[in-house]
Image (spheres, helix red, strand yellow):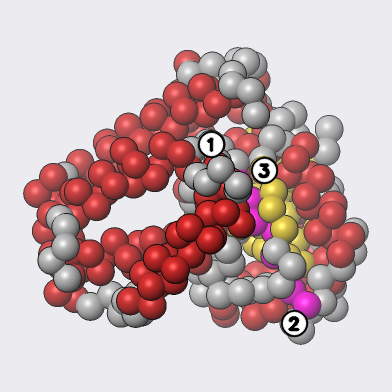
Amino acid sequence: MDKVAVVGAGLIGRAWAMVFARAGLSVALWDKMEGVADRAMGLIEASLADLHAAGLVTEAPATILARIAPAATLADCVAGAIHVQENGPERVEPKRDLFAELDRLCPPAVVLASSTSGIPASEFTGNLAGRGRCLVAHPVNPPYLVPLVELVGAPWTDPTVVTRTRALMERVGQVPVTAFKETRGFVLNRLQAALVAEAFRMVRDGVMSAEDVDACVKDGLGLRWAFMGPFETIDLNAPGGVADYAGRFGPLMAAITEEQTPFDWDADTVGRVAEERRAALPVEGIEGRSAWRDRRLMALVAHKRGQPV
């Protein structure tokens, strides 16, 4: 049984452990904070039970859980692993130190991947002897339900490392996409940033309430985007496809984007949106609503699995 090392046992690390274990791999889970990896096992067990109830895993949760084991030390965690998935703090210095230690501990053939949401691998792997085996494998939260993984190498990442990581992600049921070069925030977050910035602008400029902006996505764009991307969407929205769409709507879309100046996340606008959200959902309700979100995602994933592509 191939072994994967998951470094960091927070929300994303726990999710990665489930992804690898449900695919039949052995998983070692380590966190530098004492007791965190052990406590993570109970949370993983509960999530696996939810997945089983939703029909998204057919094996008994206990069988999958048995493939995951907390490790006492980082060295124990990575020993014998074919792949390391790092989930440490979103700061350059801790990642630089951790990857230096991983590079020292792991044989040259082991891939070192980071789950970072926006720090390019070039910022924390440049001085490593084994920098060619390092890359970003950025998941979407929570990765055991949302399968997309962005693979982003540094300029020095060996192309075969990207190929091997893509094959591993496909093997464990994820949907890998490969970036040809590094960008700030990678691709998924850049797409999300554009939409979120425009949503804030609509509230800032008094065009629409936060609740109704959310409705535009969840009851509008999001219904299509659950099973097709923006290019396929516009391809189907004109009789002649993308070129026809550009001819019909390109000038309108260009005029709109000319109006979309950068949004600086000013405190007043953020405060207005936060006030609306807290009126709709008190802070103490966020955890329960997040669990509701995950159950809805489970139902959506189960539905998509039964549909033709």
Q: Which residues are magenta?
A: 148-155
Residue 98 picture location, percent across and down: 65, 70
Q: Tell me which numbered mark, 1 or 3, is placed earlier along the sequence.
A: 3
Element marked by disc 1: loop
Q: Which of the 4 image quadrants contains residue 274?
A: bottom left
Compared to 105, does 66 lie above or below? above
Identity, as a three-letter code, of the amino acid under mark 1 = Phe
On screen, residue 140 versus residue 177, left or right, reads left
Is residue 133 left or right of 299 when viewed as pictured?
right
Q: Residue at x 30, y 79 (%)?
A: 264
Point out residue 91 in the picture as x, y percentages from the top left corner. Answer: 51, 74
Amino acid type of the residue that numbered disc 2 sits on in the rendered structure: Gly
Q: Nearer the viewer, mark 1 or mark 3?
A: 1
Mark seen at residue 175? 3
- Binning the other alpha carbons within 10 Å of mark 2 as few (below 14), some (14 to 19) or many (20 upward) gives some
Q: Does residue 109 appear in the picture of this structure?
A: yes
Chief secondary structure of the magenta portion: strand
**Dots 2, 3 in contact, CB < 8 A:** no
The residue sitting at the bottom extreme is 127
Q: Which residue is mark 1?
A: 227
Residue beneath the point at 76% across and 84% down: 127
The quadrant of the picture occupied by the C terminus is top right
* Amino acid type at mark 3: Val
Image location (x, y in percent) of residue 304: 55, 26
